[in-house]
Image (cartoon, rainbow, N blue to C red):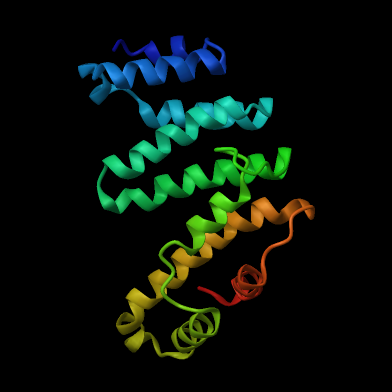
Amino acid sequence: MPTDALNDILQMDSAQVFDWLNNNWSSGNEDNKNFNWIGLAQAAAQNAATQRDTTWALVATTIYDYLSQSLHVQHSESFMNSSMNIRAYMIRLLGNQTGDHILDIDRLVSWFFSDLTIIPSEALHVASEWKESEDSTRREHLDDVRQMRRIKNRLSILKTAFANDTLHPSESLREWLLIWDYLP
């Protein structure tokens, strides 16, 4: 694809871009490897926010979801966080719509709990141990701290969605949101 392809695509409306995306991916176009997918996802996310357009959000989340499954695991979480951040922001702007690919809060909540292996009281204990440990022993807790940071990052995304005060988290999610400040 020519270097100006991204600019050409961004001149289309959101529905046209979504159609282009689906057609391009289904054709197995060899130029896809060199295309600036991250740039398109970022631009689509910006358009979604400024235009309050869920189709632009769908373009962005579709790309981020694809990238989270296609690239090295190291970047997978970052791309998935980007996808969920877009959803959270759009829910905050436009409200919850059950069953909607973008606006359904249950999708975010399920994602948060999907691979959680610890309960809030344990997370508080781990965070407290790490904060109280001496610098020389902190390396021993590095995996635990990474897990706590991952949880805090995901909670930050959820906090965005629940910021409009029209949605109320479940009791189990509320427990997590209450300890957010204590996580590293």
| Residue that extends furthest to the right in the rendered view of this protein | 166
Q: Where is residue 159 in the image (x, y as percent from the top left)?
A: 65, 58
Which residue occupies 36% across, 15% down? 23
Residue 32 in the figure: left or right of residue 184: left
Which residue occupies 31% across, 43% down? 69
On screen, residue 104 above or below 136: above
Residue 36 in the figure: left or right of residue 127: left
On screen, residue 135 above or below 7: below
On screen, residue 82 above or below 135: above
Which residue occupies 33% across, 87% down? 136
**Looking at the figure, which quarter contains the N terminus?**
top left
| Residue that extends furthest to the front in the rendered view of this protein | 99
Counting labels gives 0
Q: Position of residue 116 (x, y in %)?
A: 44, 69
On screen, residue 141 above or below 71: below
Residue 85 in the figure: left or right of residue 143: right
